[in-house]
Amino acid sequence: MNLKDKYIDFFEQHGHKVIPSAPIIPENDPTCLFNTAGMQPLVPYLKGQPHPLGNRLCDVQKCFRTNDLDEVGDTTHHTFFEMLGNWSLGDYFKNESIHWSYEFLTKVLNIPVEKLAVTVFAGNDVVEADHESAEIWKSLGIKEERIAYLGVEDNWWGPAGETGPCGPDTEIFYWRSTDPVPVQFDTNDDRWVEIWNNVFMQCEKHQDGSFTPLKQKNVDTGMGVERTTAILEGVNDNYESSIWKPIISKIEEVSHLKYEGENKRPMRIIADHIRAIVMISGDEAQIYPSNKDQGYILRRLIRRMIRYARNLNIDMQSDFDQVLANMIIDDYKKYYPELEKNKDHILDILASEKKKFSRTLEKGLREFEKIVEHLDTNVLPDEFAFKLYDTYGFPIELTMELAHEKGLSVNKEGFDELFKKHQEKSRAGSTAKFKGGLASDGEIETKYHTATHLLNAALKVVLGSDVHQRGSNITSERMRFDFSCDHKLTPEEKEQVENLVNEWIQEGLEVRVETMSKEEALKIGAEAMFIEKYPDMVTVYFIGDVSKELCGGPHVKNTKELGHFKIKKEEASSAGVRRIKAVLE
Ligand code: SER
């Protein structure tokens, strides 16, 4: 059994329900590009909303952190990673949490207690010093010398964004070295590596920086799969663990090179990026490479991977990328079945982005070499950085990396300036086009946004007022809407919903927005997904008198602008949740 299976098995035996990983692209949080921690999708439940599966949960969560992207290439960094987590939603607290962590580490993973050390919270004016956790650790055999009290910088976790659930934590460290284990735990000695974080999530941080106690005391733990697997297997380079071995071997095979010396870095980058590419493009959100948001990250990952594959002389005409992607899909589909389901999408994206970029990469690199040769400063001219982007499709970060390798710097502000100017020009162009009958992307998405509100309202009319939105996702091609409903829609119901939305569109209903207090919004019965996630003052969008919904916008001014609404698909999303895919034609 691998670490993930052992973990899930253990917590299931201790009364936890296994929840599927939430999508890597957060469903209801446009302020956040990716899920960065296991707890992120659970915020409403940590704040007191009852979870349908009860108050003890565990999972393996797909996570992605963009801040590590440029670090990838060393022995420890990854963009995509998996986080194991177990949660108590107002159920057990410190005692069980620490006992089970200890039991899992020492009895299931057979880690000798001598190799463990822990930190606990030293206390501040919000929460007092955590002697309770220290005592529990001691009762389990962790010596006093192996317990360090640390402050907010080290032993306080969260919130994940600016506001939300957070609390003190106790972190567990492992002696990752063949050197003898010192008696005294030195938190500055990096041979002690953190393997598990148990957060006692009991506070909520507010916009003004203040803290209040949460309705309930929660436990939120997180363990990184890659790091812990490497540790357990006794390797110092994560990429030498069983997680990465087959992928690295395949890269060795297609490049006819060995994983050694200076080949290591490009090989690690390819391995990390291909997995992240599969996970992002395989997510239900159906992301495409683009120049913004998640699409841009996906593009950067693919293009950076291709650049490093070229450095290893991998044949660009070969299907190395497809072979690697297929390996990842096969490896992970047991945990994330959407990968199998979206396999064609993943492979298509990869093929077309590779085709697009490998055509211009060579030319761009040649031009780069030429310019660099004749440069008499150590700063790459802004116009050239922009040309690499605009003509050859080099993400600015890639250009910065290339420049850095030559000891040059790039003036990012100068590039941004040119980028902005260019955008203004093309925006003016697309407005002109719109007048000629073609909408730009932003306008299409705005229309879908308004259509989402209409669909939400129509479902309530047809199926009953207890139908609620569970998620939504919009691209310029379609809208997707998840809602609570216990049955497959009949053809009549589907038709009714579709007709109703189209009727409202034809009626030319006015869309208006009002700002009011959250209480007021609740009082007038405005629809909201996670009311507690909203600030005290909210904006409510009204569409004629058929819909009122808390929302940040933007929306069209009049429903007439939407055209014709058509449901393309109605299917199950998860237990008790149905999914509609629809288009505006
Ligand atoms: N939220 C904590 C972390 O990300 C524990 O899961 O480390």
Image: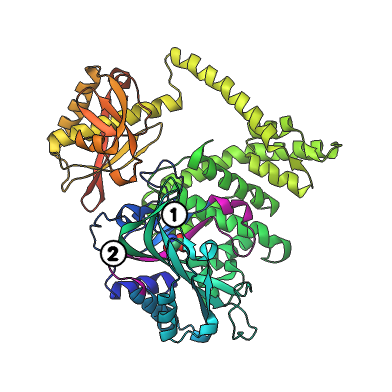
Specify whether residue 530 is in view: no
The picture places residue 156, in percent across and down from the top left corner, at: 48, 62
Query: Mark 2, residues whose alpha carbon is within 10 Å: few (<14), some, or many (≥20)?
Result: many
Residue situated furthest top in the rendering: 436
The spot of residue 96 in percent (x, y) is: 33, 76
Q: Would residue 544 be found to the left or right of residue 178 on screen?
A: left
Vertical side of 326 occupied by 414: above or below:
above
Could you tell me which quadrant the N terminus lies in?
bottom left
Number of numbered discs visible in the structure rendering: 2
Please give the range of residues in magenta.
66-94
The quadrant of the rendering that contains the C terminus is top left
For badge 2, the amino acid type reads Gly
Q: Mark 1 is on which residue type?
A: Pro
- Looking at the image, which is closer to me, 461 or 276? 461
Residue carrying label 1: 159
Q: Is mark 1 on a helix, strand or loop?
A: loop
**Residue ranking furthest to the front:** 125
- 321 vs 82: above or below: above
Tell me which corner region of the image, top left, top right, bottom left or bottom right, holds residue 547. top left
